[in-house]
Image (tube, rainbow, N blue to C red):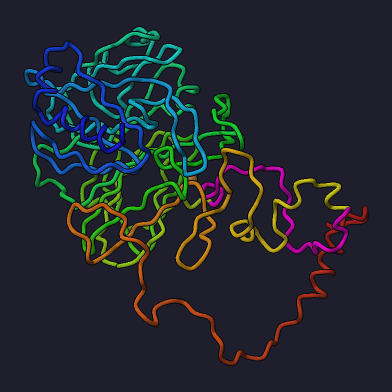
Amino acid sequence: MSNRRRFLQASAFALGGTAVARAALAAVPEAPSADSPRTQPPLVPPNGAPYNPVVTLNGWTLPWRMNNGWKEFHIVAEPVVRELAPGMKAHLWGYNGQSPGPTIECVEGDKLRIFVTNRLPEQTSMHWHGVILPNGMDGVAGLVQPHIAAGKTFVYEFTMRYPGTFMYHPHSDEMTQMAMGMMGFIVVHPKDRSFMPVDRDFVFILNNFDIEPGSYTPRVNTMLDFNLFCFNSRVFPGIDHLPVRLNDRVRIRFGNLTMTNHPIHIHGHHFEVTGTDGGWIPATARWPETSVDIGVGQMRAVEFVADNPGDWAFHCHKSHHTMNAMGHNVPTMIGVDPKAGLAKITRLIPDYMSMGSTGMSEMGEMEMPLPDNTLPMMTGQGPFGAIEMGGMFTVIKVRPDLQPGDYRDPGWYRQPAATVAREWTGPLPQETRAAPAGTAGVELKARKPDGHSHH
Ligand SMILES: [Cu+2]
């Protein structure tokens, strides 16, 4: 079945009609599933209190059914295949066909009944990160509830007391289950629709994997040395772009379930941090930023007015997080003349050709032989050449001619004439500095350990 049809069917399930009438007879609602890693259109709420839905980057929102005043969702924990970017698929664990699982959207005051079915080969549980709820609904297996054994279904019931930005993830064999991709987003919309309204509201989770190039399954005992840094289990150039209309007020919410912090940086705009997983920040307590460092387990909502047309990079500022899987034992060859002693170098360092002698940019252009099922470290083509990125990188596309609610990719920005950096072809001032050629040699010599070093 096509992704589109499956999604429409899932939506119809929430919309009403015979499918719902049948499902309503069942004690447990159907569990819709998605098989596409592409961003799905926002799910306009078919019932319950109205709200302005979010858009999950490379994801979707889980449909629900109403049952005597309860909003009922059905989440299925199961093995999934996730395309990280075209050319690489990962064998992960996730929810309802994807990793991350679908976004749960509801409204402040909603009564939620969430069925969690475990189709994994091991026990699990579900924790509702940041949600204020009764102790026995908190999902910490062993502490406040028994584990959900393989094949079993548990039900969680609680009222969403506060609006905000939250997550769900297992609290059972966490290191394995999170390393395998088990997580999802929760958005609780305010009951009062005039509270902090925005025109576009994007959400995604920062997650990471350690997948050896050429293999499919993440290592689950990795502590820090992950090699794929993702927005919602996608890496550049697989991460969809964020199309926004000129002068839209835009909110982007993200949660960090990697094992390190990420300074998320925007180009062309200033944003304010307006929310955390603890709630909304009063306007008087905000300050302008262009980067927000988001710690492990934290969530942030940032907001800005998209008043600057163009294609604006939006990325983690750790440069090794905007790269795809790479080996770490590759030497730096910058400044080394590749013709001098090439044979010697290749003998000592078989990986030599995987690192450029003038920088790494040539890798973005080179046709490198890669193992099956892996991605170039630096890749992606823009209108002016190779973008030389990977990992946590995408583009916010600000356009005057987008319609409200239109999330289709508008293509690359066409800068107005004479507003693009260009090569200078006029005269240059006379070079006054000493020629670097000789100095470099001296420096190299001076650094060479000779047993008579000065301190
Ligand atoms: Cu990062």
The number of discs equals: 0
Residue at image coords 49%, 46%: 391
> Is residue 357 found left or right of 153 in the rendered image?
right
The front one of 407 and 2 is 2
Residue at image coords 32%, 11%: 144
Residue 146 spot, x, y in % from top left = 35, 7
Residue 97 spot, x, y in % from top left = 36, 27
> Is residue 119 found left or right of 19 in the rendered image?
right
Residue 84 spot, x, y in % from top left = 47, 39
> Is residue 95 found left or right of 73 in the rendered image?
right
Does 187 sit above or below residue 289?
above
Considering every residue shown, the one lying at the far front of the view is: 1
Residue 170 spot, x, y in % from top left = 38, 21
> Is residue 162 found left or right of 165 in the rendered image?
left
Q: Is residue 330 magenta?
A: yes
> Over which residues does the magenta segment extend?
319-343
**Quarter of the C terminus within the rendering:** bottom right
Residue 212, picture quadrant:
top right
Residue at image coords 39%, 56%: 395
**Quarter of the N terminus within the rendering:** top left
Residue at image coords 33%, 62%: 269
Does 217 sit above or below residue 158?
below
Residue 272, picture quadrant:
bottom left
Examine the residues drawn in magenta and state their main secondary structure. loop
The front one of 451 and 226 is 226
Does 434 sit above or below residue 154?
below
Residue 424, picture quadrant:
bottom right
Q: Is residue 275 magenta?
A: no
